[in-house]
Amino acid sequence: MTDYVSINRSFWDNYAPEWVTRGAAAWRASEPYWGIWETSEAELNLLPADLQGLDAIELGCGTGYVGHWLEQRGATVTAIDNSSKQLATAQQLAREHHSEIGFLMGNAEQCPLPNESADFLISEYGAAIWCDPLLWIPEAARLLRPGGQLIFLGNAPLAMVCTPDSGADVTETLQRSYFDLHAMDWSEAEADPGGIEFNLPLSRWIDLFLKVGLVLDEYLEIQAPEGDVDNAFGTPRAWARQFPAEHVFKLSKPARS
C-alpha cells in the first residue's frame, strides 16, 4: 500500500495553519460539539460526565481540544498525532489553558504505550478516518482496559460512496463500490486535494469489532441540524439533512469476569 502515513503527515503539516482559529475556539467552548456541523454534546452524548481518576487517550488529536474536554471531566489525558505542526498548535493552546495533556508525536496505529493503558479512548476525525481501521482498531483494543470505552466519529460510508474521485462535493449519485471501501486517495484530487482516508462497509466495521473483542454499544448516524451554513467540508447541508454524512461508534471492552 502507498505510504499513507507520510502522505497524511505532510498534508496536515501544510494544512495546520488553517486549523489554528478553529482549534482555539473549540478549546474555549463552554460545552463540547462534534463533527463538521458542530453537533452538540447534549445530542450525541459522547463523553461521560465524570472521568475523575481515569486515563484517557485521544487518537489523532489535531489541535487537542477533545483532550481538553476530557481533562475538564477529570481524566488524565494522553494525545497522539501524526503531524508535528498540528501538535505545535495543540501544545501552544494547552499552555494557554494551563492544560497538563501529555502529547505524543506518532501514528495511532502503533502507539508507544503499554497494553491496557486507558479507560477511555476517543477519536474525532483523527485515527477515525486517517488511519487504517484494520490496524488502528486492534491497537485501540490493545490499549483499552477491560470495562473501558472506545468512541469514534468520522465520515459515514454512504458519504464516501457518493464523493467523486475529483474531491468535489458529495453527490446524490453513487461514485464507487460500497463493498470495496477501504483506502481512498485524495492526494491528487482535482477539486480538493487532500490525504489518504479510510472507511469500511458497515458489515466490515462490525466484523472487525468482533474479531478484536469489542462490543458495539451504540451506533449513530448524524443528521445535520438546520442552520445558515450551506456547505461544510464538501458536504452540502441539504444532502446531510437527507443522508448520513457522519457516524459514531460507541464501543466497549468487556470487563474480566
Image (tube, rainbow, N blue to C red):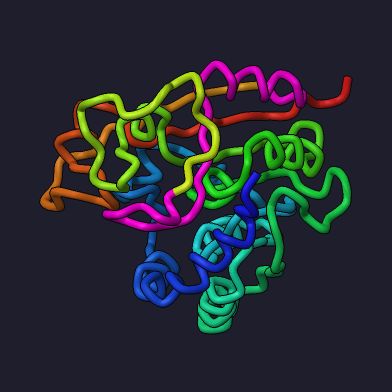
Quarter of the rendering containing residue 176: top left
Where residue 135 appears, as percent x and y from the top left, is 71, 39
Position of residue 238 relative to residue 23, above or below, is above
Quick one: 31 or 111, which is closer to the camera?
111
Residue found 37% across the figure and 57% down from its top? 193
Range drawn in magenta: 186-214
- The reply to whether residue 72 is in sight is no
Residue found 53% across the figure and 28% down from its top? 200
The quarter in which the N terminus is drawn is top right
Quick one: 248 or 154, which is closer to the camera?
154
Tell whether 82 sits left or right of 34. Answer: right
- The reply to whether residue 174 is in sight is yes
Residue that protrudes farthest toward the left in the picture? 228
Residue found 73% across the figure and 50% down from its top? 54
48 within the magenta span: no
Tell whether 137 sits left or right of 45. Answer: right
